[in-house]
Amino acid sequence: GGESGQTTTSTSSAAPSAPAGKIGVILPDSKSSDRWETADRKYLQEAFEAAGVEYDIQNAQNDKTQFQTIADQMITNGATVLMIVNLDSGTGKTVIDKARSQGVATIDYDRLTLGGGAEYYVSFDNTKVGQLQGEGLVKCLTDKNADKPIVAYLNGSPTDNNATLFKNGYDGVLKPKFDAGEYVKGPEQSVPDWDNTQAGTIFEQMLTQEPDIAGVLTANDGLGNAAITVLKKNNLNGKIPVTGQDATVQGLQNILAGDQCMTVYKAIKKEADAAAKLAVALAKGEKPAATSSVKDPETGQDVPAELMEPQAIYADNVKDVVADGYVTKEELCTGDFAEKCTEAGIQ
Amino acid sequence: MSKVKELPGEAIVAATQAPSVRNTVVAYVQRVRGGEMGALPAVLGLVVLCAVFATARPSFFTAINFANLFTQGAAVTLIAMGLVFVLLIGEIDLSAGFASGVCAAVLAVTLTSAGLPWYVCMLAAIVTGVVIGVVLGTLVAKVGIPSFVVTLAAFLAFQGLVLVLVDEGTNISIRDEMVVAIANRNLPPWLGWALYLVCVAIYAGVQLRRARSRTRRELAADPLWLIGARVGTLALIAGLAVAALNLERSRNPNLVSLTGVPIVVPIILALLVLWTVVLRRTSFGRHLYAVGGNTEAARRAGIPVDRIKIMAFVICSSMAAIGGIVAVSRASSVDPNTGGSSVLLYAVGAAVIGGTSLFGGKGRVLDAVMGGAVVAVIENGMGLMGYGASVKYLVTGSVLLLAAGVDALARKRASAAGLR
Amino acid sequence: MSKVKELPGEAIVAATQAPSVRNTVVAYVQRVRGGEMGALPAVLGLVVLCAVFATARPSFFTAINFANLFTQGAAVTLIAMGLVFVLLIGEIDLSAGFASGVCAAVLAVTLTSAGLPWYVCMLAAIVTGVVIGVVLGTLVAKVGIPSFVVTLAAFLAFQGLVLVLVDEGTNISIRDEMVVAIANRNLPPWLGWALYLVCVAIYAGVQLRRARSRTRRELAADPLWLIGARVGTLALIAGLAVAALNLERSRNPNLVSLTGVPIVVPIILALLVLWTVVLRRTSFGRHLYAVGGNTEAARRAGIPVDRIKIMAFVICSSMAAIGGIVAVSRASSVDPNTGGSSVLLYAVGAAVIGGTSLFGGKGRVLDAVMGGAVVAVIENGMGLMGYGASVKYLVTGSVLLLAAGVDALARKRASAAGLR
Amino acid sequence: MTPLLELRGIDKSFGPVKVLHDVGLSAYAGEVTALVGDNGAGKSTLVKCVSGIYPIDAGQMFFDGREVHVHSPRDAGELGIEIVYQDLALCDNLDIVQNMFLGRERKNGLLLDEDTMEELAERTLSGLSVRTVTSIRQQVSSLSGGQRQTVAIAKAVLWNSKVVILDEPTAALGVAQTAQVLELVRRLADTGLAVVLISHNMNDVFAVSDRIAALYLGRMAAQVRTADVTHAQVVELITSGRSGELGLKNGVTA
Amino acid sequence: MTPLLELRGIDKSFGPVKVLHDVGLSAYAGEVTALVGDNGAGKSTLVKCVSGIYPIDAGQMFFDGREVHVHSPRDAGELGIEIVYQDLALCDNLDIVQNMFLGRERKNGLLLDEDTMEELAERTLSGLSVRTVTSIRQQVSSLSGGQRQTVAIAKAVLWNSKVVILDEPTAALGVAQTAQVLELVRRLADTGLAVVLISHNMNDVFAVSDRIAALYLGRMAAQVRTADVTHAQVVELITSGRSGELGLKNGVTA
Ligand SMILES: Nc1ncnc2c1ncn2[C@@H]1O[C@H](COP(=O)(O)OP(=O)(O)OP(=O)(O)O)[C@@H](O)[C@H]1O
Ligand SMILES: Nc1ncnc2c1ncn2[C@@H]1O[C@H](COP(=O)(O)OP(=O)(O)OP(=O)(O)O)[C@@H](O)[C@H]1O
Ligand SMILES: [Mg+2]
Ligand SMILES: [Mg+2]
């Protein structure tokens, strides 16, 4: 990534004949995960450029007020399609309502706006992500033949609704095991703002309080790395499985090194392409059909949807992520990791 | 007692004679050159910003964007207005942002879970603000903990409180029409004009009555022409604003019409007038300035310093509550981030850019509104520019610095001339 | 000149006679009762906190937790130490947190992308800090923009800069052994003891030399027994600490041994001594206090006020850089949140809890370390308690208030007696 | 005749330093009592104890024969004690009128009655020979030393108080202004107030005072009628604590 | 004989208020020049113009015959001009020794030489009749008014300067201390310094000064030798700007 530092408003000279409208995209933040600025922005840009439509991609920096301000400004600037990754359903709905009253079409990207009633919803299933994490941890613990392991939770930001969805996912897998007495529920804490430094302190204290922790469910790769750093300090790295999400270079390297059990890869390019296709069609005044639909739990209405499947990544399938082009070999196989890459069969 | 001689007491040079137009203008120019510029630097900063954004993005100067500006900046401005009171007495309130979040959450909970009518809920939110202010003020004034620490603790505790109120991170949608209207609906155009007329008339009336009463007592009074000029300027600027806001700004006027002054505007104006009167025309306001200027002198003058401090915190937190209500209205929802992120820093920044001193004793509510306008224009303009995340941060920082730099350089002359 | 009479100039009551043990103790008790308590309230606060946490969680008083405390609090403490300089001159640096983030990112980028050796990278990070300080200081001192606004702008801009440096949000892993060692490795036990001996010896030597030189000049000097008592106390406390840190704290002592003083501890100590000497024993330090106490008086005394202010910002930002390096080491990674969230507020809080005034002129580097310890103990203890997010925020806020309240009530007596 | 204001056995320490030892003082209605003493003798501290700025360690205070307890300047003000402090304590960010009426603003309903205050302030000030004050709406931070002092004096005499204490009121004043203030002091006493005047200027002290109280190193050396002592005796009391019959009995040191 | 310090045609306004009009002043080495004038006449403003605290609007300043431009107190200090300001400007958070050596600390290599400073400070202060100062390591915030003034004076005379300007140095001082300071002023002049003394006390002015300069409403009314005028004449110059032959020619107002 990295080319997103420039103004992204541009027009392609090779615009097709139809008087296409303008597409506005609001990304949520740049700190909970690097995907928004490095992946989504890039892929959406590529897709829009290819279709030759005008577009404007902005990031709300996890600030609801800014989110609304950007929406206002995009409509002011003449956007006819608005694609949003809401920060929460309330603001999302306000934006969608306002857009609709101005005759602007909307797409929910990655997160469903409850009660919003956008034209389309394109996403990964976040609960599914959590579920994969839970299953991954179970797999790794089983591999280690752990007996009644104590499992600690390092949840995402307490103020991030996605963190709640992830937790629902892994709780769905692990809670039955706690209830059955197979696993023991260890300490659980949420990490404010997904802050890795605080995550380090929080996990260090968990380990002090409960020295026999045998597995850690961490909500993403950054938090995972924080836990791994503490484990390393205590020479426990590799002995206690840690989960992750986002298939970042850091996470993948930790997996290759054997310090991390798994991560969840979300093929963002597919998601972005699907969303861009819908947006371009809307901008040209078409109304394409979606492959499936999702029920809005608040209104009970069906929202046309395109849903992508997340994929669990372990040491043996790290190569899939590289093959997909999400992470390059140069980034991943630096220094000591060259050897491990070869072992893992990464070309 | 041989030394006590009668010496004629010379009267102070009181300019009771009505000054001519020329003299007044010359004196004003001299004052400005000497550094007493009032709101001039902030206005200058605003003009520079608007010019920059308007050149870069022509859509900046459209009716719809003008209307957006008000609703976008309202919450921060309201919180900044309250912060002025705390800054005036030389204290700080780091918790104002999250206090607005707590009050917003109270509004949401009473509205949805308890299902109470909107006015009861708003009252509950404001009462929550008052209680918060009493607690903070008491800890600062009576227990003597530095306000930075008290409000830092409150900053943390209130984050927890918001989480508890919104059930650990869920997001409460607000659907009450009245609450949503505040930041999302507009006055009918005729009402806008009616309010406009009432305001201008009252302003003119107050100015005239004051001048007449002073002339009667043979005190220096503003001449009629000056009052006329002031009222005229106000009437002109406000008239233009109302006219612009009454333009059709819907993108599909056939589908839906969008005209009129946003409802928050009269709310902000009313509070601006209220607090300005309190600060400048009541003994409480006088005492606030005294405590901020020289706490010891205020105490020696018999002013109940502790009570004044507590009151300042109460006003600050209540204004935060009102800001929170407006924020809820704008977002039509409450979540644990309400009042978080940069709300507090922007609010303090607004007050300081407007000219309020962090050391107390200097500041006006109008400053907060001017500073709030600067912050809103920056956010609004940056939204139009469409930069990426990193560039946006960089440019926003630089623009803020630019606006403050204009102000600082303008004031620099003043202190160089020995006027502080 | 009839009026000029010779009057015998009375000498000032200079206590050149060596005071007895009893007198000194009585005088100390009187001073404490009168309010000159130095670090006593902070120590009291710490003791209360430790007692509370130790009762709630016995694991609080284990060797491993004691060692954790140091590494957990190191970054905030280092940033707080730098902030003391800016607070001393009555300014504020809101950007210190993100400045540490920028420097951390510079370290990461030079280390990984550029592949430079670790010492070059650390130097680059610190130089970045110096440059940041020069820019901020110049804007405040020369251009005259209020530091709150300058550093608020920097706060925004640096967030952007970190994002640019870490490629819009990627998380850079640091695997350099030397960098990681700072916060994650320990000194061999013998080295801990050696350092301990050297420190105690130097302290004793300095104290003795000073007393001898003053006695020679017939100035009031501390008696030998007092110096002995001081050196003894230091030796005892430091000795206990080193002994505790040299205990085995590995969970599997057979598998791997974990003992020794964490490497950050001597780093913090060295900086503490350095800055304390600068503040108390150099004219630069004296001038910092003067500028903070009465800028006008300092200017009239011929002190180059602008230069002093810039230097204060440079020290603050360089310390932020060092804090950033320690944070990087501890997390073994850099991401856009490095230096963000609550780092700044905790750092300022640490300085203020320690007794540094936000209005300038009052504060010590030791205060920042004491305050940093309070903040670290709170974070550490709260981590052990294992509360949910909301309760954690609430309790952290209350505990912070408690610690500050102990301090405030202890100091309250002093101001009541007319000593301010 | 009972004194209007009477202090008995006042002790005051700052931490380890004892500044006042068993000090007594009486001020009678209709009289000017001069309080004299060397630099650092404790005069200002005594005044601040009376006004409640400093709490006293021991001792009693009587007002009109009743024992009173003053905990803050507010209490002192309510008793009718008005004080001009040596470190004037004006609010630099307020203007002259605002400072003069601070804490006792005239109101017109809820709002301030600025016009009345301006009129009254101007009248009081012009009686004190202030010139070159451009406007009484000037901030006090821009006043000269003497002008500031005049404002502080004007502030204190604006009220109908029973006791007025002036701590070196003429220190920064010019010749004419000093004369004006001394005349004012005499006039206040003549209308039945008890006035306490602190001054280092013996000419002034002898010109207006009825009684003289001399502090020496925190102890009351003597309280005498002005008519009964000479210039030289008072200077001796100030500098050595005794003068012939008068003064502290044995050479006490701080 | 060229004056050591000479001002010509100094103008200074604060915003719309003109405080100094075309003021000239000469101070000669070995002489005490008294600068007198009513409250608000502009004496302190003139001093602050000399020290570079206020920039001047017009006029020239000569030092030892050369024209100099002083932009900050630092420049003035480097020329050898030492000033005691009326608003003393001490750092309340520093102790007596620290204040006295502020900006010119004695060093021992890189570190401060506290012991030497303490010795020197004590010696200078004890020559000025300061008593009841418990310790010279006391913070100046806890000093009495007169003690603060003494510290400020001691600070200024500690250096080998060529010109010393004292703005009402004895205002808060007791009888003995005043005498001591006046004697010091004379001694300074006798060792060849140019001393400018601002005072409202005519006795003091006539006791030590060689020349008198009278400011009236921001204008220099007269500069005369002390021997050539009487007490009454000077008072008249101060209060009305003229006295017979002397003074401003026509009734000028501010
Ligand atoms: N807050 C304080 N802390 C410690 N010592 C103090 C404090 N205030 C005053 N002192 C000491 O108390 C003594 C008396 O001070 P005070 O101000 O009462 O003297 P004074 O008689 O008013 O002298 P002056 O004529 O100089 O004004 C002085 O030695 C002073 O240093
Ligand atoms: N910063 C300022 N702004 C505006 N006016 C000022 C300022 N400083 C002083 N003045 C005015 O200038 C005039 C001269 O003041 P200055 O302090 O020089 O008087 P002075 O001769 O020293 O009087 P005093 O004997 O009372 O000390 C006064 O009328 C004062 O109000
Ligand atoms: Mg005194
Ligand atoms: Mg003066």
Image (spheres, coloured by chain):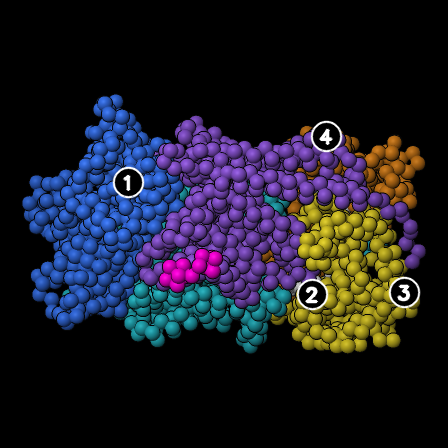
Chain colours: A blue, B purple, C cyan, D yellow, E orange
If the image is split into quadrants, where does the N terminus of chain A sit?
Answer: top left
The Cα–Cα distance between marks 2 and 1, rounded to whole angstroms, is 65 Å
The subunit carrying tag 2 is D
Kindly identify the amino acid type of the residue bearing the numbered disc 1.
Answer: Thr
Q: Chain of mark 3?
A: D
**CB atoms at circles 4 and 1 under 8 Å apart?**
no
- Dot 4 and dot 2 within a common chain: no
| Measured Cα–Cα span from mark 3 to mark 1 | 99 Å
Binning the other alpha carbons within 10 Å of mark 4 as few (below 14), some (14 to 19) or many (20 upward) gives few
Dot 3 or dot 2: first in sequence order is: 2
From the image, which quarter does the C terminus of chain A lie in? top left
Report the mark closest to the observer, 2 or 1: 1
Report whether mark 3 lies on the same chain as mark 4: no
Region in magenta: B109-122
Q: Secondary structure at mark 1?
A: strand
Which corner quadrant of the image does residue B111 belong to? bottom left
The circle on residue A106 is 1
Q: Mark on residue D230?
A: 3
User: Residue C345, position in %: x, y?
Assistant: 42, 55
Q: Say which element carries label 3.
A: loop
Secondary structure beneath label 2: helix
**Identity, as a three-letter code, of the amino acid under mark 4:** Val
